[in-house]
Amino acid sequence: MKAAWTLCHDCGTASRLPELPPGGVACCPCCQAELDRRQGASLDTGLALALTGLILFVIANWQPLLTLKLGGRMLGNTLWDGVLAMARYGMWDLALLVLATSMLFPLLMLLGLTGVLLPLHFGRRPWQGARIFKMVLAVTPWAMVGVYTLGLFVAYVKLTSMASVAPGVALYAFCGLLVVSAATRATLNPRAVWERLQPASPPTPGPEFDPNAWMACHVCGLLASLENHARQSCRRCHATLHHRKPHSITRTWALLWTAALLYIPANLYPVMTVIKMGRGQPDTILSGVKHLIESGMWPLAILVFTASIVVPVMKIVVLMFLLLAVRRRSTARRRDRTVLYRVLETFGHWSMVDIFLVSILSALVDFGSLATIRPETGGTFFAAVVLLTLFAARAFDPRLIWDPSKRDAP
Ligand SMILES: [Zn+2]
Ligand SMILES: [Zn+2]
């Protein structure tokens, strides 16, 4: 088999993919991004994991996650209760956000994977396979099972100081779902699925391959000629093709400035009010951290502080730095800047933990005047900041870091 050409998704460098041994990984010679890997595990492992994930998802949605006992009354909360609690207090935007990231997107991801991998297992062509797999890849970063689990863990520790709290069956199912999601990401190579759906015919292999005459699909990596590329879509997944993300710099700046502005009300307004024995006390993100420190929950305070204060600020500052370096056409430490961008993309969504925490607490602590926790406006601003920084990171094209002069050493 002829080695196929590929363009690196992080720096745009052209390289030939070697025939890999089982377990082998092909990396970009320029920025060290992973270009291809060959798992020992087959696509059937991915199918088994997706099916297991679906079973765990049903249990996680059906049973209570945590149960709280206070004043002789017992309350349990399911995932759905977290959504309803936000809606009950009139915060529909947050209710929809929690619904999408904790239930809808994980479900779409698992159903989509099963829909693609099950027919492939039986040697059949999946119905709308490319479109469904494209949807799976699009929702995967927004399926925040891991962050929700962290939110549950924080809620559990926080509530132990207030009442008697016990983990429910769904909590274990949710932890299982987290393991399954992580295992699916680790074992499933999207490139292998695309090859099964529609093998790519390598274009013009040979030393004369000119990376500037080709572009790679942002979704499936298939190469397409740059000639007549206006409004051209990918032959395999039908995504719109661009040489670089369109208006990347302008869009990223706009999203970042909006996020930076909204970060002010996100910290000034309370995110939740804790009512104990009829007395209410609104909490901003910072005062929430302060209370955790006062109660001696240092590790939890550090965790919430990092996820809610450090991560969003770091995202805004680092992305602004990357944009300014691109504008200066800097060629210094390009590999390090690419790594910085990758770290940002990997950990950015952990700031959502505070939103999930408020949703879990307001669903669970609903004991009238005895004890109630309700969400407040600050949560909406904070969620907007998190979403805007996530969109900004996705709008930035890391290949711009490498564009000024490709021939220089990294
Ligand atoms: Zn690269
Ligand atoms: Zn494509």
Image: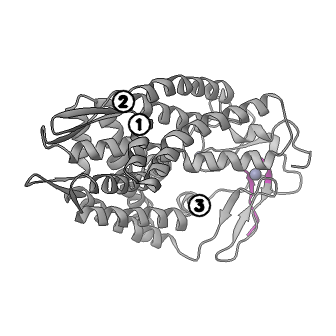
Residue drawn 56% across the image and 59% down it: 190
Mark 3 neighbour density, 10 Å: few (under 14) some (14–19) many (20 or more): some
Q: Nearer the viewer, residue 32 or 117?
A: 32
Q: Are marks 1 and 2 in contact (CB under 8 Å)?
A: yes
Q: Pointer 1: what residue?
A: 287
Classify residue 15 as left or right of residue 387: right
Residue 317 in picture, x, y percent from top left? 65, 34
**Where the N terminus falls, by quadrant?**
bottom right
Q: Amino acid at mark 1?
A: Ser
What span is colored magenta in the figure?
Answer: 1-14
Dot 2 falls on a residue whose secondary structure is loop
Dot 1 falls on a residue whose secondary structure is helix
Q: Amino acid at mark 3?
A: Glu
Classify residue 367 as left or right of residue 306: left
Residue 63 in picture, x, y percent from top left? 20, 60
Q: Magenta stretch: residue 11 in it?
A: yes
Q: Pointer 2: what residue?
A: 270
Mark 1 neighbour density, 10 Å: few (under 14) some (14–19) many (20 or more): some
